[in-house]
């Protein structure tokens, strides 16, 4: 008997979106992996954070961050505009609420490049939708090399980021997945596999209930 469900129908089963978090010590490569993921996958969009940090060369307002003044950040906190926010490296960073909840219901995924403090806050608010991945550098020597090679921070800023690296790494066990970013392409493949598998989780595939009901009729 012919299968009444084509593969495109089954692929299109409705699912809840997910909040896909990438964290790491500064310089381990989460922005690099994020960009690769965004370039390869149309179903995930970057949650663009607001920050009081000054813009780096090449960063674009609204694409990399919303660069805001201290006063504007204060006002956003006051108006409860953030899903989460934290102090990182002497500046403030926050995830604007935007349309995240609505988008999740519509099956859209969001990618978050945030630190462990933001991850804890997102998990407290919405644990069922969060998938968290911690990226480790292959070594501390390589981490410094990457920060220096990026060529965007002063030696003082690099020292401060290195000083904080061990503290950041100490949060690795709070994450669902841990991936070592030695070879960037291999790391990307692993992160992408995690995303694909998490999308297939039974509890996220809300379209399964009517689909299975149809099979049983
Ligand atoms: N696997 C890798 N091998 C070598 N270089 C890498 C690798 N992954 C990333 N890099 C390089 O390391 C530097 C830091 O990477 P990236 O900016 O993605 O780090 P990050 O974790 O997002 O840092 P931050 O938290 O400071 O934003 C960049 O110059 C990037 O091109
Ligand atoms: N808790 C949050 N952390 C954030 C957010 N946006 C970025 N970050 C983290 O800050 C550091 C430094 O970032 P950089 O761009 O200055 O190198 C890094 O660990 C980011 O993941 C946020 O909205 N909330």
Image (cartoon, grey):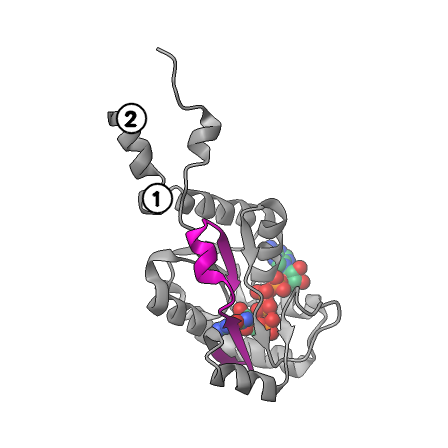
User: What x and y, as percent, mark residue 18?
Assistant: 43, 54
Q: Residue at x 75, y 67 (%)?
A: 58
**Residue 206, label in figure:** 1
Quarter holding the N terminus is: top left
Please report whichever mark, 1 or 2, sits nearer to the chain's N-terminal start.
1
Return the x and y of residue 126 as percentages of the image width and height.
Answer: 36, 63
The yes-or-no answer for disc 2 within 8 Å of ligand 2 is: no
Task: Name the residue located 52 percent from the left edge and 67 percent from the top edge.
Answer: 98
Toward which corner of the image does residue 93 lie, by quadrant?
A: bottom right
Magenta part of the chain: 86-113
Ligand 1 quadrant assignment = bottom right
- In the image shown, does 213 or 84 lie closer to the viewer? 213
Q: Which residue is mark 2?
A: 215
In this picture, residue 94 sits left or right of residue 131? right
Q: Residues within 10 Å of mark 1 (few under 14, many from 20)?
A: some
Mark 1 to mark 2 CA distance (whole Å): 15 Å
- Pinpoint residue 216: horizontal percent, then vertical percent: 24, 26
Please identify the quarter of the rendering in which residue 72 is found: bottom right
Q: Quadrant of the C terminus?
A: top left
Toward the left, the furthest residue is 216
**Residue 213 visible in the picture:** yes
Q: In the orientation shown, which residue stands out farthest toward the bottom?
A: 71
């Amino acid at each position: 008997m012919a299968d009444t469900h084509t593969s495109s129908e089954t692929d299109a089963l409705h699912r809840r979106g997910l909040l896909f978090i990438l964290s790491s010590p500064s310089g381990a490569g989460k922005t690099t992996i994020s960009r690769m993921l965004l370039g390869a996958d149309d179903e995930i969009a970057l949650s663009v954070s607001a920050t009081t940090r000054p813009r780096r060369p090449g960063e674009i307002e609204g694409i990399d961050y919303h660069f805001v003044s201290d006063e504007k950040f204060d006002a956003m906190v006051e108006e409860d505009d953030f899903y989460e926010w934290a102090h990182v490296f002497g500046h403030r960073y926050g995830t604007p609420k935007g349309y995240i909840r609505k988008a999740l219901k519509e099956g859209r995924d969001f990618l978050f490049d945030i630190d462990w403090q933001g991850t804890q806050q997102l998990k407290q608010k919405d644990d069922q939708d969060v998938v968290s991945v911690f990226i480790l550098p292959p070594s501390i020597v390589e981490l410094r090399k990457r920060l220096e090679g990026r060529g965007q921070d002063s030696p003082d800023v690099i020292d401060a980021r290195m000083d904080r690296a061990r503290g950041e790494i100490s949060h690795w066990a709070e994450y669902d997945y841990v991936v070592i970013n030695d070879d960037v392409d291999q790391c990307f493949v692993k992160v992408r596999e995690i995303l694909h598998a998490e999308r297939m989780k039974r509890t996220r595939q809300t379209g399964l209930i009517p689909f299975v009901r149809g099979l049983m009729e």
